[in-house]
Image (cartoon, coloured by chain):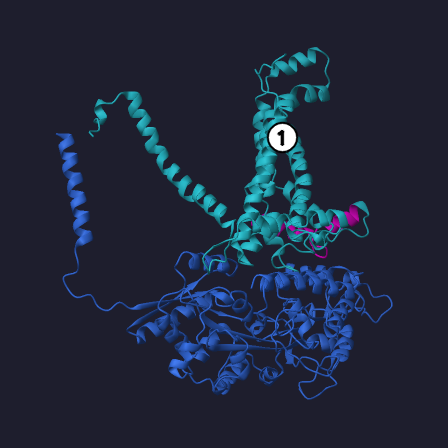
Amino acid sequence: MAFPSIQKMSLARREELAGYAFVIPWIIGFLVFTIGPMLASLYFSFTKYDIVTPPQWVGLDNYQKAFSGIWDAIRSGDPRQFGDPLFWKSLQVTLYYASLALPLNLIFSMFLAVLLNQKVPGVNVWRTIYFLPSIIAGVAVTLLWVRIFNPRLGILNPFLTNVFGIKSPPQWLGDPEWAVPALVIMSLWSVGGSMIIYLAGLQGVPTDLYDAAKVDGANAWQRFWNVTFPMMTPVIFYNLVLGMISTFQYFTQVYVATSNSLGGLGSPQHSTLFYNVYLYQNAFRYFDMGYASTLAWILFIIVLILTALIFRSSDVWVYYEGQLRGRG
Amino acid sequence: MKNKLFKLLALFAMASMVLAACSGDATEAPAEKQKVTILVGFGTGTDPDQVTAQEALAKKFNDSHDNITMEFLIVPNEEATERFLTMVSGGNAPQLVGPHGTSTIARFKEYWEDVTPYIEKDKYDFSDFYGPATTINTYPDLNAGIPLGIYPSFLFYNKDAFDAAGLDYPTHDYADTSWNIDALKETAMKLTLDANDKTPNDADFDPATIKQWGYADTWTDMRGQLTMFGAVDQGRPTTDDYKTATFNAPERLLGAQWIHDGVFKDHFIPDAAGQSAIDSTGADPFGSGQIAIWYSHTWFMSEGLNDLPFEYELAPLFYNQNGERIARIHADMFTMVKSADNKDAAWEVMKWLTDPEQIVDVCKIYGCLPARISTEAAYSDFLKERYPGIDYSVIFKAIDYLDSPHHEGWVPEWGKVNDALNNIQSILYTEPEADVQALLDQGNADLQKILDEYWASH
């Protein structure tokens, strides 16, 4: 079989080949470093595997371990009846965090973006100031906030006491009730990334829509709610999907904040036992790579379902400019 | 023409590669040295001065051995587990790991080579080693290695704090049974001060503003903290067949209640927030000046006794409620990895590192007391020079009061067991209203569940 020389190929064909040549390194990397490990972890999820001994096929045992005892736990109201109570605890902690952090991050970053979209002197300086925290490494931000939250030495509790008169402010990361809210507050520090995307979206809203709304007598709130918000829904949708995925992958901050604290990773009293923390413990502390792989696949499926639901719901609430909606 | 030139060059390049791959050396290759990599990172050994000292140690070994090359692979402590597991799973296991203690040896128990055949082959003589050093990391199915060093435990006390409170220093006499758990509590309460220098014995004492606590033993886990109270299984929360949980034994219950009362009722032990505040200062608890009596091991000396702004001394651990003294001990060694190659060479390196000629120098790097009795005088000289003025006899006598079974020793599902019990520890230090009996019963039930699951599949 003879290959035609490059000179004899058409321009389109040569460009096509060049395209493939450029993309091949990425495809190889994707296959070897993403798809390969994913398939391996899928296999391991059906095995008992501790690294030292070869994987031993156990079928659905790992999945059964995660989900067993559901009805007993529901009937008795006792979470200890779950086959693996910490699996459910970690899921609960993650969903609790997501339910607080996700909407607050979306609202707060949008709020900042709207503020920073105003024509005020020095707006670029303000934008830089608000964006800066998001480029600081997560470990550094966490160490900073651990210090801020410290009940005895931190600056937050004296502020709450002296300014708001709160006599017994929370123990924050040392209190099982307040540990997750503390992490939510910490997450607001890094909304700069979402804020910049909102800002770009805001600057793409056609000004003639505002002009038309003004002519119709709309006030500032009505202009925001009837013009800005609908035009921003694609950006909200984008930030929602990415935010949801990253929320379910939450790990570094908890690892830094709690791994050396009394009670260890996920403390106090498992109140910060996020799903990925529990996955990490199973893999690298209990050496149960099979079950850790199972947890990874369960997480993948949960995120996939939630993402699909968000995509499905987008038909109802996301508005794309120029999109025509069918009318029967 | 261009095409022909390109093809010619390509052919030449391929031919060169084939020739290079197939050719052998004209001269006979010298016998290859066996390489022994020592993974350092699970315990001590990662500080810059230790790195330099280990490099010098490797050079000393390599200069005196023709057939083995030794190298240290030093990784940060927080990456050690992932690095080790990656190396093992990748078929590139290090030959030796260490120095590390009982907890790491127990946690990775399945990974270590049993060195019994090497000991028997060489008729290796253990008579020069302290008894505890040879037993702590030995199980019926595993002798993990040759002991390197031990770390007895005792009290470090801030003499300035005692002077300010007008208190006598604790006795250094191990036979003095009046130095017991009640005496410690009484002393520690007098040493605890709030912002207005009031003690918990004063009516207007404010626990929210404590600036100095009397006593702390917070650099250990739940098993470690409760060992001194003398349950029948001491540091092991199970029966000797590892099948029945004994975590809620009466002695542990008493100990847990004593700790909880010490934190929230008598206020001489820092609660979780207090410990977190101390950590935030960047100093260790004793060095922060906020703990008057600190219970720890010899390994604390190298990192905690540098340039302290106050006078300090050492004292024996107090007797417990039953008139027993159980002072935890740690023991370090290098362990051989089961799946590694060059194991014979690794055994030679292990012997060399723990040889009487070397062991003192090696222990100086890692801050441990050499496990060989014959080196006691040499190490005492080192201690005298390094920590002048302290009563180092306290250190050596503590060895006689070790915990057995050990508080870091193997139990089934070591990580899960310790995490479950450490969750109880977290509650003891955070919940003023905790029902300690119920807490220990729950911990026992959790532990029994872990044991039952383990034995169902083993």
Q: A316 or B158, which is in the foreground?
A: A316
Q: Is residue A142 visible?
A: no
Label 1 chain ID: A
The chain painted blue is B
In this rendering, is residue A249 above or below B309? above
**The chain drawn cyan is chain what?**
A
Q: Position of residue B26 (x, y in %)?
A: 14, 61
Is A151 magenta? The answer is yes
> Tag 1's secondary structure?
helix
Q: Quadrant of the N terminus of chain B?
A: top left
Q: Residue B72's x, y, as percent? A: 40, 66
- The stretch drawn in magenta includes residue A183: no
Query: Is residue A215 visible to us here?
Result: yes
Locate the C terminus of chain B by quadrant: bottom right
Residue bearing mark 1: A113
Type of the residue with mark 1: Ala
The image position of residue B439, as x and y in percent, is 75, 63
Name the residue rendered at 47%, 58% in the picture. Answer: A51
Look at the picture and state if B433 lies above or below B247. above
> Which of these two is toward me, A150 or B103?
B103
**Which of the 4 quarters of the picture holds residue B449?**
bottom right
Taking the image as shown, residue A173 lies to the left or right of residue B415, namely: right
Direction from residue A296 to residue B270 in the image, left or right: right
Q: Is residue B353 left or right of residue B437?
A: left
Residue B68 appears in which quarter of the rendering? bottom left
Q: Which residues are magenta?
A: A139-163
- Percent x, y of residue B170: 70, 82
